[in-house]
Amino acid sequence: MDIDRLRAETPGCENVTHLNNAGAALMPQPVLDALFGHLWREAQIGGYEARREASERLDAVYDSLAALLNARRDEIALVDNATRAFDSAFQALPLRDGDVILTSTVDYPSNYLAYLSRQREIAIEVRVVPEAERGETSLDALTEMLREPRVRVLSLTHVPTQSGLVQPAAEAGRLARDAGCWYVLDATQTVGQMPIDVEALGCDILASTGRKFLRGPRATGFLYVRRERFGDLHPAIVDVHSATWTGPDSYELQPGARRFEIWEQNFAGNLGLGAAADYALTIGLDAIWERVRRLAGELRARLGSIPGVEVHDRGAERCGIVSLTVEGVEATEVRDRLAARERRINVSTSTVNSARLDFPARGLTETVRASVHYYNTEAELDELADAIEEIARAGVASSPGPSPTA
Ligand SMILES: Cc1ncc(COP(=O)(O)O)c(C=O)c1O
C-alpha cells in the first residue's frame, strides 16, 4: 500500500490528524470528484437532466456495492444512511405477537430502539444473548436460545459504535440459518475496514453507511437483502419508485431490494458512494483490514502503557476502533483538548446512552473513541499517544485522588 499516495489523494490529511474514522472518515479525491462533479452538472443543466445524463454511472453504483459485499446488484438498495437501511428492513419483517428477537449486549442503540418501538404494535419479546468471556456474543448461549421455536430474528451489530470488539458474525449466521430464523446484521462499522462477504456471513439483511470506514459522503447508505427473502418483505413506505401503481386498487412492488428505495435521492451522494466502494476495492479489503488491525493494535499497546490511561476494547478479534479513558479527565474534555488548534487531532466519544447494556456492566459512563484507518500513519499514532500522555499527566496531577472515606 502506497500510503504517501493515498494520503496525497486525501485532502483532509493536510489539515488534521484524523482518528475519527468510526465517525466519518476523510473522503478521497475520487469520491469528491464524483460528488462535486454531479452537483456541478445539476447546477449547469438541471437536476433531472443531470440524473438522466448520469444514469449509467448511477446504475453502476449497484455493481460496485454488490462487488464490495459479494452480493448481486438486485440485492442492493441505496438509502440515506444505515439507520434508514436497518429500520426500513426491520419494519418490514413479517413478525407476529409472541415472536422473539435475539440481540446482543452491544447492539447499536437505534436498532434496539427499533425493537422497542415495534413492541407498540405487536407483542414481540427482545432477549439479549449473554456475552462470552471476552465480550462477544456467546455462541453457546446463542445455540441454546435459538432452540426456542418462537425466535424469529437474530439481530447483531458486527462492530459496536463504542468499542473495537468484532462479533463472530459468520458463526452466528450459521447458527441462525440452522435455526431457520432471520439474520439481520448491522455492518455500519465494518464495511470499508474489513472484507465483507454476505455469503460467508449468511445474513438475510445487512445495513451500512457511506461515511464511515468506506470513506463515502455523509447521508449515504445502503441495504442488502438476500434475494430469496424479497417476497417476504413489504416496505412500510411505498412510493412511485418502490412500486408501480397498476390500477385503482393495485400496485406492484419493485422485484428486488429497490422496493426499499424512494424516488427522490441524493444522486451526487450515491455517485460518491459508488466511487468510495470502487476506491476501497482497488486498494483491496484484505490489505486494508491487515493494516487497520495492525495500527489499532499498536495504538492500544502504546496507550495502555501510559499511566492513568485505560484501554477498554475487548474481543478475541478487534478492529480499528480504540476506546479509552483518562483518569480524572472527562472524555469530552480529552476530545476537545486533542482537537485544540495546536494539535488538531480528531477523536470522538461514546456515552452510556449508546451502550446501556454494555457500559454499566463494565463500570463505564463514557469513553474516548480513537478510530484508525489505513491512511493513518505510525507518526500520527505517536502524536495521539504523546498528546494523551500529556493530558493524562495534567489530569492525574489535578485530580483530587480517592476520598479518605471511600
Ligand atoms: C454500529 C452502528 N450502527 C448504525 C449506526 C448508524 O449509522 P447512520 O448514522 O449512518 O444511520 C452507527 C453510527 O454511528 C453505528 O456505529
Image (tube, rainbow, N blue to C red):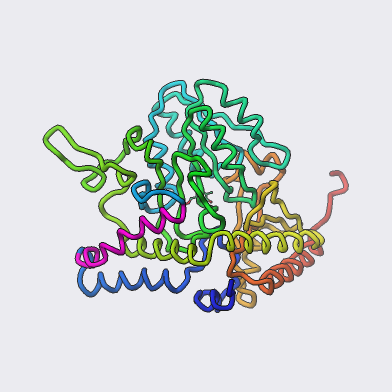
Residue 55 within the magenta-colored segment of the rendering: yes
Q: Position of residue 86 (x, y in %)?
A: 43, 44
- Image location of residue 343, percent across then percent down: 64, 75
The magenta stretch is: 49-69
Point 60% across, 72% down: residue: 17
Check the image and report above or below for 235 versus 82: above
Where 161 falls versus 238 (above or below)?
Answer: below
- View extreme (right): residue: 404
Name the residue rendered at 51%, 68% in the picture: 26
Q: Position of residue 241 (x, y in %)?
A: 24, 48
| Magenta part, dominant SS | helix
Please give left or right for residue 184 compared with residue 89 in the image.
right
Q: Quadrant of the N terminus?
A: bottom right
Task: Please say if 202 is above or below 187.
Answer: above
Q: Nearer the viewer, residue 279 or 111?
A: 279
Q: Quadrant of residue 217?
A: bottom left
Q: Position of residue 119 (x, y in %)?
A: 44, 29
Query: Is residue 386 left or right of 319 when viewed as pictured?
Result: right
Quadrant of residue 377 within the rendered picture = bottom right
Q: Residue at x 40, y 42 (%)?
A: 225
Q: Name the residue nearer the viewer: 9 or 332.
A: 9
